[in-house]
Structures are given as C-alpha cells and as structure tokens.
Image (spheres, coloured by chain):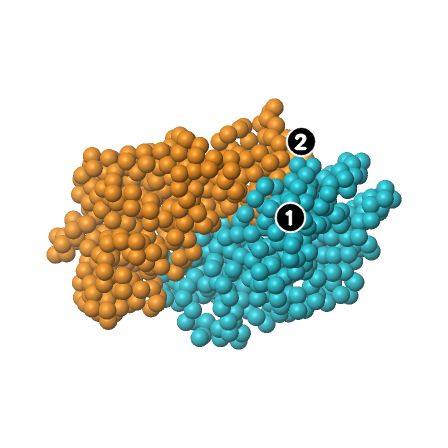
Chain colours: A orange, B cyan
Amino acid sequence: MAVADVPTPALLVDLDRMERNIASWQAMADRNGVGLRPHIKTHKTPEIAAQQLAAGAIGIASAKPTEAEVFAAAGCDDIAIAYPTVGEDKWARLARIAGAARVTVNVDSDHQARGLSAAAVAAGVTIRVQIEIDTGLHRVGLDPGDPAAIEAFARAIDALPGLELDGVTTHRGKFGERLARMTNAEAGHEEGSILVGLAERLRAAGHPIPNVTAGGSVTGPGVAEVPGVTEVRAGTYVFFDAMQVAAGSARPEDVALSILATVVSARRAGWVTVDAGSKTFSGDRGAVEGSVATGGISECVDLDATVMRTTEEHGMVQLGDGVSVDVGRKVRFMPYHVCTAVNLADRLVGVRVGVVETVWPIRARGTTR
Amino acid sequence: MAVADVPTPALLVDLDRMERNIASWQAMADRNGVGLRPHIKTHKTPEIAAQQLAAGAIGIASAKPTEAEVFAAAGCDDIAIAYPTVGEDKWARLARIAGAARVTVNVDSDHQARGLSAAAVAAGVTIRVQIEIDTGLHRVGLDPGDPAAIEAFARAIDALPGLELDGVTTHRGKFGERLARMTNAEAGHEEGSILVGLAERLRAAGHPIPNVTAGGSVTGPGVAEVPGVTEVRAGTYVFFDAMQVAAGSARPEDVALSILATVVSARRAGWVTVDAGSKTFSGDRGAVEGSVATGGISECVDLDATVMRTTEEHGMVQLGDGVSVDVGRKVRFMPYHVCTAVNLADRLVGVRVGVVETVWPIRARGTTR
C-alpha cells in the first residue's frame, strides 16, 4: 500500500530513520561503556522494543505495571519501572512480573518501599529498587541536597525483606531557567555527577549500589560521558519530535514519526482544516522548558503550513504565502510531543520509501495502571 | 467495591449527576419543542447513549465513521456525522451504515459531496446531508455572509444522486473576542438565527430544508429558544467539566466525572505528585475562549489542591495552606476538558454514593477514522 492510500489520521513511522536512531543511540552508549535502557513509553510496541534489544539495549524501562506486563508477555526479561509505583494492586502486579523477569523499581517513599517489600515477600520474589533522586524536574524523588535523608532511606530499604537496593536513579529533563541556560551536555554531565556522588557516599556507608542510572533523550548523551554512570535511560530518541528538535537533541531529519491527515475543508482563504485535532496531535507541550514551539502546534513536513489551533477532531492549518491545498489532499505533520501522540493511537504504520511495510498495534496503549 | 479500592488513575462517573444532566437537558429541549441529539464524543459509550435515547433524544451525533459504527452496532438507528467527512474509505463506511440506520452527514465541499454521492449510489442507499455553516468557530463550513455560495452548493447537492439535502447545521462554541463579550444565551440566539435565516432563504429558492440544527453545551439552550430551530446537538452536557463551569454553562456540582488518582510522592513541602499526568488529564484546553483556568490544570474536589503541571504519568499538585496529604491517599480532580480525558481512558467507573455500581468499557475510544 502507498502512503497516500493509508486512512487518516495515521501515525507513520519512517523505518529508515527509526533504525538509524536506534543504532546511533546504541553506538553512543557503547562508545561510553554504559548500558542503554530504552523507555517504552514512546512507542508502547513490543516489536520496536525487540529491535532496540537486538541492537544491544540491556533491558527496557516502563512507567506502569500494566505496561510492563505487555512487554514481559512479549519476552522482555529485564524491566525497570521508572516510577515510584504506589498501590496494593500495582505492587502485587510487579511481584508477579518479578517471578519471570528481572524487575527494578524506582522508590521514593517509605510507604512505597514497605508495600513493595510485602508484595515481594508474599510472592516469594526479590525486587530490585533504585532510590529516585530529584535532580531538578521537581516531580518525584529525594533531594540530593539532603544526603542524610537519602542514607536513612537506604538503611530503611536494606531492612526490608524482598527488596534489594540496586542503585540510584533520576530523570531531570531540562526543566527550569537554570537548566535552560546550560547546554544539553552540561545538564547531562551535572545530572550524572550528582548521582555518581550520591552513589559514592552510599557505598562509603556500606551499601553496594551497583547501578547509577539517569538520562533521557535530551541529557542522555551527556549523562553517558560521566565516569561511574552505568546506565542511560531514554524513550523519545527512537522517534524524536518537534520538542526534541527545539531542545537541540535532534535534527528535523531525525524525526521518524509523522502524522498523516486529510484536508477536509478549504473554505477560508489562507487556511485549511485537516481531520486530525487534539485527539491525534495531543495537547501536550511537554516538560522541556524553552522548547515550546512559538508559531503553532505542529508544522507540516510536506508544505509551508502549520497547525495553529485544534479542536478534538479538527486541525486548523495556516498556509504559507502562495500555498494552496485542495480538499482530499493528504499531508504529513511533525508531532510536537510524540509520546502523547502515540498514546492516542492504536497502530503505527511503518513506511519505507513511501510504501507501507508493516502495521504494528500499539499493544501497551491504555495501560495507565 | 468502594471508590477507595478502585485502581488509579480512574475516571469516576457520578451516576446521580449524569442522570440529572441527561434529564435536565432533555427537559430543556422538550420545553422548547426541539429535538436533542447528543454528541457521543464525550462518553463514547453505547450504554450512556442508550440512557440519553431512553430519556427522549432523537438520535446521536458522532464525528467519525468508525465511532458511528460502534453505536450502530449497539442499535442506534439515527446517526448524524457532525463532520465534513472526506476519504474513499470513510464514504464507503458511511454508506454501509446507511444501509441499516438513518445517516445524516455535514457537508462543506463539492469534493466531499461528490464522493459521498458516489458511495451512496454504489451501496444503493440514500444519505442525508446538511450544509455546514461557519458561525464563528472558523474551522469548517460555508460563510453565512455569502448566501449565494450556499445556494450554489445547495443546487450542486440537489444535482447529485444518492444524497438528500436535509438541512443546515453549525457548531460555534464561543470562540473569539466578539462572542466572549456575549452571554451564552445571546451567542446561542444569534447562532440559531443565522441558520434559520439561511434556511428560509434556501426554502425560498426551492429547497425544502426540513432541519435546522445547531448548538453545543455552551450555546445549546440559547439555540433551542430560536423559532425555526428543529434540533440541538451537544456532547459535554452529559458530564460537564471545568471548561464548561468557566464558560458559565454548568455549576461545579453539575460536573459528573472526576479523575481518581493516588499520591505517589510527597518529598517537597507544599506539593505532592499523583499518578495521573497528561496521559490521563489530557493537555487539551479546548476552544472556548476565556475559559482557560488561570490557576492550573485541574482542581482537586476533595482538598484545597491543584494540579499545576503534568508530565506524561505525573501530576504535580500544589497544596493549599495547611493541607497535608500522605503517600497512598486517593483524591479526585475535576477534568478541564472531559471529552479529551475520556478519550485517553478505556473504562468509565460508574459510582453512586461512594460505591461502584457499574464499569463501562469506552467502546468507541480509538475510533479516530
């Protein structure tokens, strides 16, 4: 099938670009001697995780236990839950997965550590945990400026059966004015150094701390260069998006996913409307400060045209000077935040040289628990 | 099951409130002698459409042919596609549905009308069409200031086999500065009057135009009061949301859907983080000008607390003075734009007096084509 025959709206994956992104990030990790652990939130698709693992990834990361279940069922045997999971149902789910796979969970509170421990004991398994550190994104994690609290938490974890303290972890992105003034490499170097310093302090206090893991698609390459970091986690690099381009972590020609839409209305001069709105693009503008596109929601990659406004099923597209598009024409747009766009769809259409090569169901979509 | 035992994140439907909303809008339509056609985009759930139809609704509206298929399969036999559908696959789909149900489609272009006509002829069915008018939302529809173009389009439709010109339609919302200065009733009265005037002009030119349909949850009650309007369409009224409260079309105590989330982190003074982020709340701020909440993304309905920022799976909640919440606590939030939040979930949890009464799969989620 040709791309022009794909029903819209559709998410097209440029397979050449995706494979190049997978290979180049793996090469970056290998060059630095660190493990690469892709976060599957971006694609939610076991077939793509399999390609990342085949390229050399050491395992996967997910946010939710139900996501992890999908990938465990597909054969992933080393899964990090990059989230301070809280809830009896969720701890039981993780303990079940840990019966068949190596499971590592970010921990942030005594409440969570105790619950996870009880579930591990009940299931007769060991769950690895990594202490989550807040290196600037200010959403979860312990304050690195209070190492005594981190040491106390490490001791509390050591005292809990069924848990094994495996390391320290963080995800910082580039949030806030201070980080926005840094280069991506500088932000990554600092991120990695904070964790390595904490790991050394915990080791001096008698905790082995085999792993130091940090990163993301913006700071990951910088993190990987810090001696002592063992693992880099990142999700978006598999596809990239306009947010990553704005953040300087990708070039437009690296962006492997586009949104195909059909022009459904052309009744106003200089504007057309396409059949993709906020339920396709998502309204998400992400957490990378300074990277919000100023001109609109999504740029067309085929024409000088920009989605300036959306309602649920309509994208209002402003055309550049002299551009004219007829009703029925299909055009492609670059997503602003690809992870949230993928989360709204049910399938990815894999394309090579304008021809559909494969269609993948997004198997872990909807796994919010 | 008690609400406190529901795994999070979850969408809770207060059944008493929902039933009251359904009844009060039906009473509003009945009082004005107009038909009420609920748009199913808000709930995407046939069981709720069945309640709306049992209350007296004349049929349903949907945006996408694949949505319509779900409701046709559930027994809905009068479906309006409130969208200028474009695409061979979509026209064929609508013609198939029209073999078993009364199907009416918004039309906006010759390209669309010709394609729909060809599909209707090929399937041996008649498809009713309504000319879509742009009364201010500027996304689709013909300019009411150019009635000659509208008359020419009506003549073109009449010349096409398989189509029956059924009426004129619009959805205006309250977009733009001029409408923001009007009351909802004024905006609705003007919206209805524009359409009634156009319908009269088309009738004078020999087109029967049996139906004049307009509205939405903001302007619908005003539209219904305009003599000559035959039908009001609205979706959000079934649940309402913070956007509707801000727009003055609902009170907080009318909002029937809340997002249940668990506190997963409480490491920063004055803040906690919950397990619902942009993949649950949605990033959508809607199209109703002037209604964007200034203080944050979503208000907690159990405590003085507000989601101020989200990443995909994290909601960063600022606590009011003196409020303290422990990790593990479940709290409810009012969605900003409920339609886009429902679109992200797979099930609705129906609750009455704190107890789960039913769980509905959101059967038409993901039907974007």
Q: Is residue A223 left or right of residue A354?
A: left
Tell me if residue A350 comes above or below residue B15 in the rendering: above
Of all chains, the one bearing label 1 is: B
Q: What residue is shown with label 2?
A: A269
- Indicate the position of residue B13 as horizontal and vertical percent values: 53, 66
Residue at x 38%, y 46% (from the top left corner): A43
Residue at x 13%, y 54% (from the top left corner): A208
Residue at x 39%, y 53% (from the top left corner): A363
Please say whether residue A250 is visible from this viewpoint: no
Q: What residue is shown with label 1?
A: B123
Q: Nearer the viewer, residue A146 or A102?
A: A102
- Indicate the position of residue B9 as horizontal and vertical percent values: 43, 61
Tell me if residue A362 comes above or below residue A96 in the rendering: above
Residue at x 74%, y 63% (from the top left corner): B29
| Residue type indicated by callout 1 | Ala
Quadrant where the image shows the N terminus of chain B: bottom left
In the rendered structure, find residue B41 and report the number of the disc placed on it. Answer: none
Q: Is residue B305 left or right of residue A66?
A: right
Q: Give the Cα separation between the discs numbered 1 and 2.
A: 35 Å
Tell me if residue B96 comes above or below residue B334 in the rendering: above
Of all chains, the one bearing label 2 is: A
